[in-house]
Image: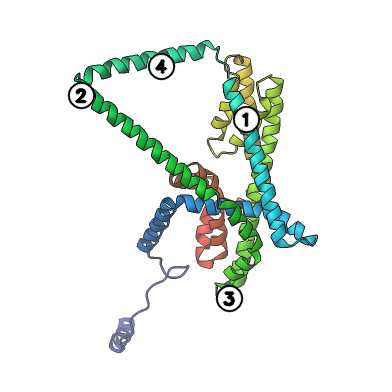
Amino acid sequence: MATEQIQRPAEAARSHTGDAEPPRRGPGGPAPNWAQVVIAAAVVLTICYVAKLVIIVLLVSVLLAFVLEPLVDRLQRIKVPRGLGAFVAVTLLLAVMYGATYFFYNQALSFMNELPKYSQKIRQSLGRMRQHAERLQTTTETVLPESQEERQAIRVRQQTGWSELLTRGAWSLWEVLLAISFMPFLIYFMLTWQEHTRAATVMLFPMEHRNTAYVTMGRISAMIRSFIVGNVVIGLFLGLLSSVVFGLMKLQYFYFIGFISGFLSLVPYLGVVLALLPPLAAGFGQVRGGGAAVIFLTVIGLHVFAINVLYPKLIGRRLQLNPLVVTMALLVWGWIWGGMGLILAVPITAALKIICDHVDSLRPYGAWLGE
C-alpha cells in the first residue's frame, strides 16, 4: 500500500510535467516497424523484377570484374599501367568467351546432327505424337466453321499472331544483345576505377563506420572471387572425370558431353537431373541397361562428391549459408530472374549475410542466415 502511494505521486508528477514514459525497447534496440520492412522489401523486389535485365548485366559484370582483378593486379606489379592491364584482361576474356562459344556451338551442331536416329523408341514416340496430332486436327475440323470466309479470317488472325510473336521475340533479343554489349565497358571501368570506387563508397559512411564498411567490402570481394573460381575449378574437375568415363564407354563427343554434364551438375538441386540428360541423349539407342547404370552412378557419384567434399573446402567456408536459406534464395531469385536468378542467388544471399554480420543491429539476421 505504501509502495502504491509512493508510485502514484511520481506518475502524477510525470503526467503534470508532460514527461511521458519512454517506449519499451527490445534487447537489440527499438522494435522494427514490420509494415515498413515489408513495403521496402516489396519495392526492392519489384524494382529487381522490372529492371531485371539491367541489374543482371551489372551483377554479372561485377562478378567478372572480381575474377579479372588478380590478373590486373599482377600486371600492375610488373609496371604495367592499370588501364592497359584492364584492357588486356578484358581482351583475353572476350577471346576466351568467343573461342569457347565457337567450339561448343560447332560441337553442339554436330552432336545434334549425328544424334542417333535409328532407335525404335524414338520412332515409336514420333508415331504416338503423330497419332495425337491427327486426332487433334480431326477434332478441330469439326469445331471450326465451314464457311470459306471464316476459315480465311481465322488463317489471317493466326498469321498475324505468329508475326507479332516473332517481332516481339526479335525485339527482346535485340534488347538482350544491346545490354550485353555494355558488359566489356562496364568491366573495364570497374577494373580501372576500382580503388576510387571503393574509397568513395567508404567515404559515404560516417567516420565511426568507415572501417567496418571497408572490411565488409573486402570480405564480399573475397567471397565473390572464391565463389566464381571455386565453381570453375569444380566444374572443370567434374567435366574431366566425366569425359574420361564417357570416353571409356565410347560415347559420341564424350569430351563435349562430359564438360557440359560437369558444369550442369553445379546447378543447385536440379544439377543431377540436368547433368544426366546429355550422356543419356548421346547414348540413347546404343547404351544398354549396364551402360545406363554406369552413367547414373558416374553423374550421381561425382555430384555427391563435389557437393559434400569439394564445395565445402573451396567455397563453403566463404558462404556459410544454411540449406533452408539457400533453398529460399533459389526460389525467390529464380522466380524473379529465371535461370540467371539461380546462378546469382547464392552470391547475393552470401553478400547480404556478410553485411548483416558486420552491422550490430542486423547480426541476429546474419546468424539466422548462417549455418
Indicate the position of residue 236 as horizontal and vertical percent values.
68, 37
Label 1 and label 2: CA atoms lie apart by 47 Å
Label 3 and label 4: CA atoms lie apart by 69 Å
Q: Is residue 47 left or right of residue 136?
A: right
Give the mark, 3 or 2, whose residue is nearer the N terminus. Answer: 2
Instruction: Name the mark nearer the viewer: 3 or 4.
Output: 4
Q: Which mark is residue 129?
A: 4
Give the mark, 4 or 1, whose residue is nearer the N terminus. Answer: 1
Mark 2 = which residue? 149
Indicate the position of residue 309 as horizontal and vertical percent values.
67, 40
Seen at 38% across and 65% down, the residue is 33
Q: From the viewer's side, name the closer residue of 167 and 304.
A: 167
Q: Secondary structure at mark 2?
A: helix
Q: Which mark is residue 106?
A: 1
- Amino acid type, residue under disc 1 in the picture: Asn
Seen at 63% across and 68% down, the residue is 196
Mark 3 = which residue? 208
Instruction: Name the mark nearer the viewer: 4 or 1.
Output: 1
Instruction: Name the mark nearer the viewer: 1 or 2.
Output: 2
Toward the right, the furthest residue is 78
Q: Secondary structure at mark 1?
A: helix
Mark 2 and mark 1 in contact (Cβ < 8 Å)?
A: no
Mark 2 packing: few (<14 Cα in 10 Å), some, or many (20+)? few
Label 3 and label 1: CA atoms lie apart by 57 Å
- Amino acid type, residue under disc 4 in the picture: Met
Give the mark, 2 or 4, whose residue is nearer the N terminus. Answer: 4
Give the mark, 1 or 2, whose residue is nearer the N terminus. Answer: 1
Label 2 and label 4: CA atoms lie apart by 31 Å
Mark 4 and mark 2 in contact (Cβ < 8 Å)?
A: no
Indicate the position of residue 35 as horizontal and vertical percent values.
35, 61
